[in-house]
Image: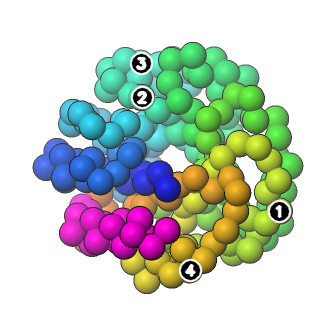
Amino acid sequence: MLIKVCGMHSPDQVKQVEEFADYVGFIFYKHSQRFVESTPVVSKAKKVGVFVNASLDEVRQSIAKHSLDVVQLHGNETPEFCQELKTNVEIIKAFGVQPDFSFAETKAFEAQVDFFLFDTKTPGYGGSGKQFDWSLLSNYQGETPFILSGGLHPNALEEIQNLRHPQMMGLDLNSGFEIAPANKDVDLLRTFILQLKQQS
């Protein structure tokens, strides 16, 4: 199970988190409470930049400036947009899920991305702390692996462990493990991830 911890700020917390997380995420969307302009060094985990409807030039500049390994796209980006970036970095394309969401929307992106991320649909493009109805995931029949996001918190451990889908490859942990926006409870994260991996 891949673990991504998103919405990071603190260099000290990043250093601790990358000891047990595979991906560390930084949000470059200016309307987010977790927006960053500068990022600390990430030496062990993969460094993810999260963007919402940014231009190709903006994303490319951020890749170079922040030494990003992965780009996560949360807006209305097209398959062609993803393809333009795919030669340089891994691509995660996020989709906001609500009861009437059609997973057929993902088909056009199959060849252009490394992972999908299924998050709760909100006006703020994620980070809401709200969970969507995970039973909807049974409607996803695609071949691209996905990361689950949206309302993941310590009390959801058993529910997560009971969730079965052949393409579910990871979790995106954020607001459910915060003391305040971008301030993570590292001990809580560590305990949760260890318990998850021990019982999976």
Residue at left offset 27%, top offset 47%: 18
Identify the main secondary structure in magenta.
helix
| The magenta stretch spans residue 144 | no
Residue at left offset 58%, top offset 21%: 85
Residue range (magenta): 183-200
Q: Quadrant of residue 91?
A: top right
Which circle, 4 or 3, is nearer the viewer? 4
Amino acid type assigned to the residue bearing label 1 in the image: Asn
Q: Distance between the residues labelled 4 and 1?
A: 18 Å
Q: Distance between the residues labelled 4 and 3?
A: 39 Å
Q: Residue beneath label 1, please?
A: 139
Q: Residue beneath label 2, please?
A: 69
Residue 15 in percent (x, y) is at 18, 46
The reply to whether discs 1 and 2 touch (Cβ–Cβ < 8 Å) is: no
Q: Earlier in the sequence, mark 3 or mark 2?
A: 3
**Image disc number at residue 61:** 3
Q: Earlier in the sequence, mark 3 or mark 1?
A: 3
Question: Are there few (<14), some (14-19), or many (20+) residues within 10 Å of tag 2?
Answer: some
Amino acid type assigned to the residue bearing label 4 in the image: Glu
Who is closer to the viewer here, 34 or 198? 198
